[in-house]
Amino acid sequence: MTQEPKAAVFDDPDRQSQSTNRALNRVKKLFRMRETGLVLIILALFIAMSFASPYFLTWVNMRAMAMAFAVEGIVVVGMTILLISGGIDLSVGSVTALAMVIAGLLFLSGVDPWTASALAILACAAIGAIMGFFVTVVGLHHFIVSLAVMVIARGACLLGTGGRPLGLYTLPPEFKFIGQGSIGVIPVVIIIFLVVVAASDFMLRRTTIFRKVFYTGSNEKAAAYSGIRTKHVVFFTTTLCSALCGVAGIIYMARFGSAQPTFGIGMELNVIAAAVIGGASLSGGTGTILGAILGVILLSVVSSSLALLDVSVYWQDIIRGSILLSAVTIDHYLNKRRR
Amino acid sequence: MTQEPKAAVFDDPDRQSQSTNRALNRVKKLFRMRETGLVLIILALFIAMSFASPYFLTWVNMRAMAMAFAVEGIVVVGMTILLISGGIDLSVGSVTALAMVIAGLLFLSGVDPWTASALAILACAAIGAIMGFFVTVVGLHHFIVSLAVMVIARGACLLGTGGRPLGLYTLPPEFKFIGQGSIGVIPVVIIIFLVVVAASDFMLRRTTIFRKVFYTGSNEKAAAYSGIRTKHVVFFTTTLCSALCGVAGIIYMARFGSAQPTFGIGMELNVIAAAVIGGASLSGGTGTILGAILGVILLSVVSSSLALLDVSVYWQDIIRGSILLSAVTIDHYLNKRRR
Amino acid sequence: PSAASAQSKFQCEPGETYIMNVMVSAHPYWVPVYQGFKQAAEAMGCETVFSGTPDYDITKQIASFEQDLVKQPAGILLHPMQSDPFIEPIDRAIDGGVEVVTFAADSPNSKRTAYITSDNLAEAKFAAEEIVKQIGDSAEYAVLENPGQSNHDLRVTALLSYMEEHYPNMKLVGRQASNQDSNAAYRATASMLQANPNLGALWIPEAGSAEGAVAAVLEAKADVLIMHADVTPTTLEHIKAGNIHMALNPNQGMQGFMGFVSLFMAAHSDMFDPFNDYKVSGFNPVQIPYVDNGFSVITKDNADSFDLNAYMEGRDPS
Amino acid sequence: MSKDLILEISNLSKAFGPIQALRDVRFDLRKGEIHAIAGENGAGKSTLMNIIDGILRPDSGEIRFDGKPVEIASPAIAQRLGIGFVHQEIALCPDISVAENIFMATTNISRAPLMNYARLAQKAGDVLARLGDIDPTALVQSLSISQQQLVEIAKALTLDCRVLILDEPTAALTEKEAQILFDIMRKLVKQGISIIYISHRMVEIFDHCDRVSVFRDGQYIATHNVAETTPTEIVHAMVGRVIDKLYPEKQGEDEKTGRVILSVRNLTEQRRFSDVSFDLKQGEILGIGGLIGAGRSEIVKGICKLEGQVTGEVVLNGRSLATSDYQQSIQEGLVYLSEDRKGDGLFLEMSIAENISALSLRQVSSPIGILNDGLETGLAERLGAMLNLKCGHVGEPVSNLSGGNQQKVAIAKLLSVNPKVIFLDEPTRGVDVGAKSEIHRILRDLVRKGVGIVMISSELPELIGVCDRVLVVREGRISGELAGQDMTEENIMYLASVLDRQLEAVE
Ligand SMILES: Nc1ncnc2c1ncn2[C@@H]1O[C@H](COP(=O)(O)OP(=O)(O)OP(=O)(O)O)[C@@H](O)[C@H]1O
Ligand SMILES: Nc1ncnc2c1ncn2[C@@H]1O[C@H](COP(=O)(O)OP(=O)(O)OP(=O)(O)O)[C@@H](O)[C@H]1O
Ligand SMILES: [Mg+2]
Ligand SMILES: [Mg+2]
């Protein structure tokens, strides 16, 4: 139609401004990043704490704080990916405990700890696969499937141990090194954590396989129409989350030198909270590893700070909850304004 | 409007077949009802249990089972309505405990127990209103808000009691009657439960106010585009759920003659599970009170049965989880076939 | 033996059953208690059942208690999760001919005939004295706790008030909740160590948190005396390795054994005619307000005897 | 003959429970043709396409592709065969960028392990440049529904396909975008691609297609060469009766009262529109035209206080309104029909009856607010019959309905109240010819009863055929007003797209 030549007239000036526009967009993007708000809030907490306590900004304290959230952080990575794909997993706590118990029992029965750990992680992946089966093939909701598995896995922990923690003091030192050793000044636990985070963050943002996770979670129908096997994707993320719980369980085992059948009760809420604070949506399609990890850090720094300041235990919960609520509120407004 | 005369032309032949159609539809509806599957599963459990244990089908056992789920059932009603509106509440356990603690402290400080209870329920409603504020006005997600409130309310319980249960042995008998008395052979607790269930079921299905809850949860935007003040609706359901927790807390207090700051830890998952088993969707828009109550009954019968059969505690969780998973799977297939 | 049993009054009728009812029934604490309960029962030719609820949920425990009653046992050894809620059920049981004895937690206003427990005050006092003995009476100490769980609360508060009263120069520098979560205990201990470089001792009311606390102390290479109540295989190993100074473990076996014996006696009160008003007032003549089952002190030297897994080898847990 | 057939379908049937959506249908598609499919709402067109794309499985029947029998079990298989599909209902990922959405299928089968976002955005930009002004890096959720429709089309165009299915692609497009689409279609056909084109707009079928197949009630009726048939014949085959007059009588001279029902003055919203003023007179249907993204929807939503921070005055029957939200607007008698029926028009999993009564719960309940099932069913059945709604019974969920029938439910919802002014945003989007003329007739009747009607439509013939007066919106401003003989497609397009205000003076 007649408009076409006119459209061309439009094009030219547009093209010119495009390159400057793009550079501007990048800067804007950085500011618009969901994570910026969280970083600011955490920074504010750090500054406040370093005034409140001279011990806060010490290397040892930072190290201890990092150790306290690193392993849970691995589970958070799995949960975030699962949330992005539109799922949820309440069984993370029990599956983490089960990994310890399986590896511990195998080790006590004479299997070498590395093989035992590998088998335990495999078993956790298998549990994830079973959940994936019930979700994708049978068609049940993640929530209810993982709730049932949470109960079953806890039961398996109790059955395997008679409810008693397994003492694994005899684990060889090279195995305990995973949980207790350091390379240079940096604890191995933190190195593992950073590797998992960096790898999963990169993959989630940049690889074609993990992009399908976003597509599936954002609109399963649209993804299916584009030929994506959405059930495979959900099956995969469900399995991956449980497998990462397995990894976390093994690290805990190496770290504490014991397998505790009651470990991780209530952990699921903490883990989901971290992911949600970091921008993951419970309805799928959005979320970043970086954000989720910032969420873990936020929750962890608050807990550590309250301990460091020796706040009365009867006040701690009230303060912790209030800080959580304020943090997400501030973050929400920071995000809103930036848009 | 103009259509009326024309509509009449259309109506005549339709009307004739309508009455037969309607009767047929009703029968079909009964069979198509989501709840039929659950009823069948629960019946099957009852029959199996009455063969497995001579004690199962006794009046005393039935009474004990009903007493165990009646009060939680009231919370489930609130949660179901909230889920239908598209929300979720993780704070139900702590808020229930807080109701006891507030009423208990007031009573111990000399307030008469009825006033104390009314104030406690009001306080719970206020907590719900605050959550509703953060969700509707600030724009945060129910999950994270209620998680923070769960922590804060638990903290308040501990702070108010120093972590120790309040002995309320001195509660007057007419107050304890709510929790411990019977009218005829039927415990008052169960009567209250039935009244709440019947009233809320009726309202949810038949009143215009609660219909708006369905519209809002089904498609919030479409509801807004139908002139429904969706924020008011969500605010209302959030407040109602917490208020019902308050009611439950007061009944527990009357029943136990004490206020327990640690009551209801982990209760939220149980309550949500019951609603979901009963057909409520976590993404809003669907759910029935009847279904949710059947969900509670199912969970409760399974727990009671395992206890009655002296199943080894180490096996109980595994069996419980497996029955839960099988039940929802069977229910899912029954529903699928009927469609 | 059957001839002999007919003569002794300390013998059960065939099929006479006693139940032990607890909350969080998979918790390992109950295991040695139930073994003691069972050993006494076997000696008297009685049947036993282990019952309760796997959950930390008072309504479920009451429901399970009421279901126990349906079976009309001779008696129930009960660990009531909360005292007052059990008053009515216990009274109803006793009025219905089922004897009830409580252990480890009490329901003092009910009609239960006996209460067997560890003396948490004695444990706390012992721990306090030991701490002072080891690090002197003007040092810094801290505690981990689990607010809301009564016996743990008692172990902590009793120690604090004992210190305050007897050793006013001892300084409490940290009081943190770990709620039996080893990672939370790790976090709390690490922070306390940061804030208090001179921390001398740590008292922990249960073993799960002790595992996390030890990890933090070892990592910080701090010289802190750790004492805790209860025991797990891992804390045992830490005791052997000297990372934990000492653990105080309630004598669970005695708790179960004495629990059974008092229950049996209450159920067979016809063998006992004491000098009081029980006949006119209508209460059970066997009334034992309080039995202390005592506690063991676990150190490097005797740690090997406290391996529950070793103890349970070849025994039936149920 | 069969050598130049790319797709042959025979004896194909499909049922959804008791509803027989397709009965023994056949269909064939030649290489390099544009083959239109016509049929009433619920005739089974989308169902057939969903079967060809592997989204649904047929109950029986055979599909031959390129002469060979095939079983299309999933969209992935359809893709491998070279079938591309633009869905009637927009299916995009809202949280993902436009570029990624467009290349979702490509990403899915790509061997490259890493994403190349820069290239993706650039390629998407190239495709989009042909269609309209859309930023490839924007998130889909920030686009208007018509822009989303363009993205859907762009998505199909990037597929390397041999058969392209377009299921009512122009329902939400204006003339300009539609023309661009037709140009592209013709280029594709020249490259040997075959196109299946579904539309309820006869003009499009007769202007751009080679053959047309007609379906009715799930049955195949006939196929004609477009050159050898007439719209009347096709419509007759579709609906089984003759529709003599496509549009109802317009307002007669004697009906002009000059009484103003609604008067809008200086309505402004920071970013979306500014300085909008117009009057709606009694007895007229007022149309609003314009290009995609011009701001038509925003203006109307602003009047109803549905969205945005709006300043300016709205006067209803001589009284200035002080409404602050839509609830109050409804009470004053202003109602709005959304253009996005799936996103904000309907409660998909709820029943037809429950949908229809959503605006008017008071009508189907007792004074104390107890719902009356009978009244509710009655209302739904009455309005359903009036709009010729095709459904099993009004208790079934709306998600079971065909697209056009869903639109009828949305309209029925509005008609259930007694509004003073109705704002309709693309009211006949996806509605078949028969029902469309029925809706138009109802609108005209309402106007005669004194109800004010404002209708946004992107379909120019409809705008011209139904409205008595048309306002044209460009870039958030009213750029002109047309009435009577001046209402021509050319004039509307001109006002909608002139480049700047000075040019207007040249006219
Ligand atoms: N998922 C479903 N469940 C039940 N019935 C369905 C379903 N999908 C479609 N139908 C029914 O199948 C019939 C054909 O629907 P279809 O969507 O193919 O119609 P259509 O020709 O595309 O109509 P329109 O022009 O309105 O888009 C309709 O009667 C519809 O109600
Ligand atoms: N929620 C929103 N956020 C940002 N921009 C929006 C939003 N809604 C609409 N817009 C933009 O506002 C402009 C006007 O949109 P509007 O829907 O009113 O156009 P329209 O004339 O009705 O055309 P259409 O045919 O696309 O509906 C468009 O450019 C659209 O992208
Ligand atoms: Mg269609
Ligand atoms: Mg529009």
Image (cartoon, coloured by chain):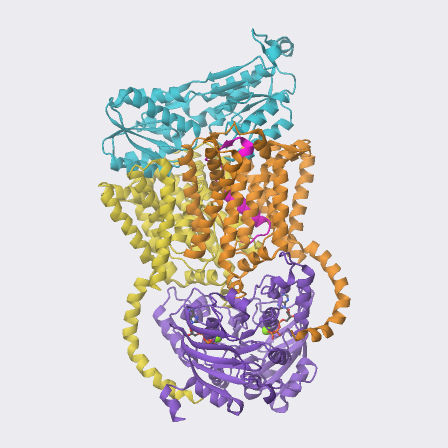
Chain colours: A yellow, B orange, C cyan, D purple
Q: How many marks?
A: 0
Residue that extends furthest to the front in the rendered view of this protein: D318
Look at the image and tell me in which quarter the C terminus of chain B lies. bottom right
Quarter of the image for residue C43 reads: top right
Q: Is residue A21 magenta?
A: no
Image height check: is A316 above or below D92? above
Residue that extends furthest to the bottom in the rendered view of this protein: D507
Residue D15: x %, y % from top left: 67, 67
Rendered-image quarter of ligand 1: bottom right
Residue C252: x %, y % from top left: 46, 22
Residue B83: x %, y % from top left: 53, 52
- The residue lying at 28 percent from left, 70 percent from top is A24
Residue A215 visible in the snapshot: yes
Image height check: is D340 above or below B322? below
Which region of the structure is painted magenta? B253-281
Residue D21 visible in the snapshot: no
Q: Nearer the viewer, residue D501 or D221?
A: D501
Q: Is residue B267 magenta?
A: yes
In the image, D496: left or right of C69?
Answer: left
Q: Nearer the viewer, residue D321 or A6?
A: D321
Residue D118: x %, y % from top left: 34, 70
Look at the image and tell me in which quarter the N terminus of chain B lies. bottom right
In the image, D244: left or right of A22?
Answer: right
